[in-house]
Image (cartoon, rainbow, N blue to C red):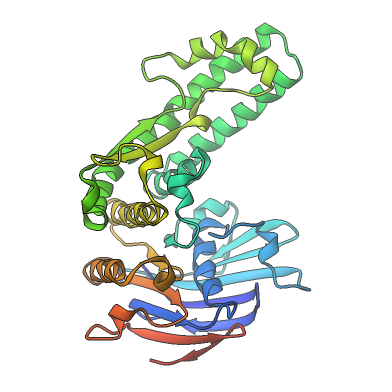
Amino acid sequence: MRLKNLRIENLRNIAMLDVALAPGINVFVGSNGAGKSSLLEAAYLLSHAQSFRAGSVDGLIRRGQARMAVAASVCKGSGERRLSVVREDGTWRARLDQANVPQLGTALREAATVCFEPGSHELIAGSGRERRRFLDWGVFHVEQDFLPAASRYRRVLRQRNMALKQGAADAELDAWDAELAGAALPVDGLRRGYFARFSPCLERMLALFLPELGAGSMEWDSGWPQQTDLHALLAQRRGLDRARGHTSRGPHRADWTLGFEHAPQRSHLSRGQEKLCALACVLAQARVHADACGDWPVIALDDLGSELDVEHQQRVLEWLHGNGEQALISGVEIPAPLRGENPPARVFHVEHGQLRPLL
């Protein structure tokens, strides 16, 4: 999959911008604050309806404006579709081939983008919420049944939490326990299936980027003990859940961890190693998507030159030349490994939210 062009309106410091993108590697260079990361952010919004940077979605809208829009022509094989998303009045609207799309998820499935950026180390060092969100995006694109299953689980979880806070009787909570346990099983099953695909891909990527740490291994945590019936566990922990006002076990507490032969615990990793682990996760997720869906996602690498040394930049770019269909890379300058025999397909200079093609 690739984006043939990208049209941006009122995203951060970009008022209006149309850019034609090439297959292969597209590089955006410019000084800090020029708007180059916002171009990658636009592609990411088409896939996630949120930024890869911290802050609210509405904070992305250019100051003084009421709406933000991103659109692209999405090419898959010999086909092409026009996708657009608009943020206005605190809500998203989406269109696909000029028709309104009632469910945002249907539109987001059309333009998969994965991203490695300066905050990506939080995938390794941060809370389980980051890892769940990362994994769930992959499951969403690979498994058609995941979105309705996850939506049902979240709905039941909200109802049980509300009942806990309101001091509902045991009979009512018995019913919610049964509902929650039933809704949890398909979510956990789909996640486990995806994790079984993701783990071997990640092991190969970790061997490429962190061979000095020895063999890598991954473990999945469903959010409750594997051999325990969730329905029975919810009843057992009801007193604790009442006191806390929320449900303490279930898929909303799921997590996954990785370790290495020579660094078995997360705390053993340096910040640089955390970044390389996160990069391996992003590229492994791209590989799983390609294997499962038949097309590569767009691969966005924000501020690559600042995040990785030249040796690891070289490894990433060699991998991109052998895999993937389109990459978007930002930086203050063209990455050193791309200045030699394998130049990027296109290079743009970004200044004050405007573009000037250099190549």
* Residue 321 on image: x %, y %: 24, 72
Q: Residue at x 45, y 77 (%)?
A: 331
212 left or right of 134 in image: left
Question: Looking at the image, can residue 80 be seen?
Answer: no
Q: Nearer the viewer, residue 99 or 136?
A: 136
Name the image quarter holding residue 53: bottom right
Q: Residue at x 32, y 80 (%)?
A: 336
* Residue 201 on image: x %, y %: 25, 49
Q: Nearer the viewer, residue 286 or 335?
A: 335
Name the image quarter holding residue 221: top left
Taking 244 as reference, is 219 above or below it?
A: below
Q: Quadrant of the C terminus?
A: bottom left
Q: Residue at x 69, y 68 (%)?
A: 61
Q: Residue at x 29, y 57 (%)?
A: 290
88 left or right of 333 in image: right
147 left or right of 85 in image: left
9 left or right of 325 in image: right
Question: Looking at the image, can residue 124 be seen?
Answer: yes
* Residue 6 on image: x %, y %: 50, 76
